Image (spheres, rainbow, N blue to C red):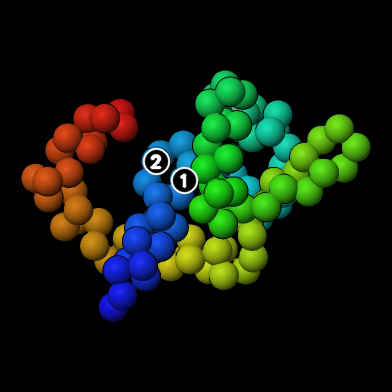
Amino acid sequence: MLKAGIDMKVKFLQGFAHKVRIQILECIRDEEKTVTEIVKSLNGNQSNISQHLACLKGCGLIVGRQEGKYIYYSLRNQQVRELLTMFDTVLADVENDIACCENHIGFRERTE
């Protein structure tokens, strides 16, 4: 595979590489929401959520639709929704392996 293809995959996967970004994706999985609604749902702060929304948008995972003074965020398309579902399916199969993997100890400590 071409290096450019690998680099693009890595950039795309960065959108999934943070707990808050996954929470946002799950939050808007079934319906679009404003930043305020997302902040309230995640019990987060607006600045942090906005930064993660910008990352998700930059990675091509979400879109924003302006209506009046509000921007409504949603998943980019059905394929992103299906990808989230596929993550759940694969995770159900491998979660015991992940839980036992010593390479994830530092990751677990950083996200808790």
The quarter holding residue 6 reads bottom left
> How many numbered discs?
2
> Cα distance, mark 1 to mark 2?
6 Å
Can residue 90 be seen here? The reply is: no
* Residue drawn at point x = 58 percent, y = 40 percent: 54
- SS at mark 1 in the image: helix
* Residue drawn at point x = 37 percent, y = 70 percent: 5
**Image location of residue 110, percent across then percent down:** 26, 30
Could you tell whether 94 is left or right of 61 in the image? left
Q: Disc 2 designates what residue? A: 18
Looking at the image, do the residues carrying marks 1 and 2 touch, with CB atoms under 8 Å apart? yes
Q: Disc 1 designates what residue? A: 22
Can residue 30 be seen here? The reply is: yes
* Residue drawn at point x = 61 percent, y = 24 percent: 46
Residue 64, above or below 107: below
- Residue type indicated by callout 2: His
Residue situated furthest bottom in the rendering: 1
User: Which is more toward the observer, 68 or 20?
Assistant: 68
Residue 13, above or below 40: below
Could you tell whether 61 is left or right of 107 in the image? right
Image quarter (top left, top right, bottom left or bottom right) of the C terminus: top left
- SS at mark 2 in the image: loop
Could you tell whether 69 is left or right of 49 in the image? right
Image quarter (top left, top right, bottom left or bottom right) of the N terminus: bottom left
**Image location of residue 103, percent across then percent down:** 12, 46
**Image location of residue 108, percent across then percent down:** 23, 36
- Residue type indicated by callout 1: Ile
Disc 2 residue crowd, few under 14, some 14–19, many 20+, Cα 10 Å: few
User: Which is more toward the observer, 64 or 104?
Assistant: 64
Residue situated furthest left in the rendering: 102
Disc 1 residue crowd, few under 14, some 14–19, many 20+, Cα 10 Å: some
* Residue drawn at point x = 19 percent, y = 53 percent: 98
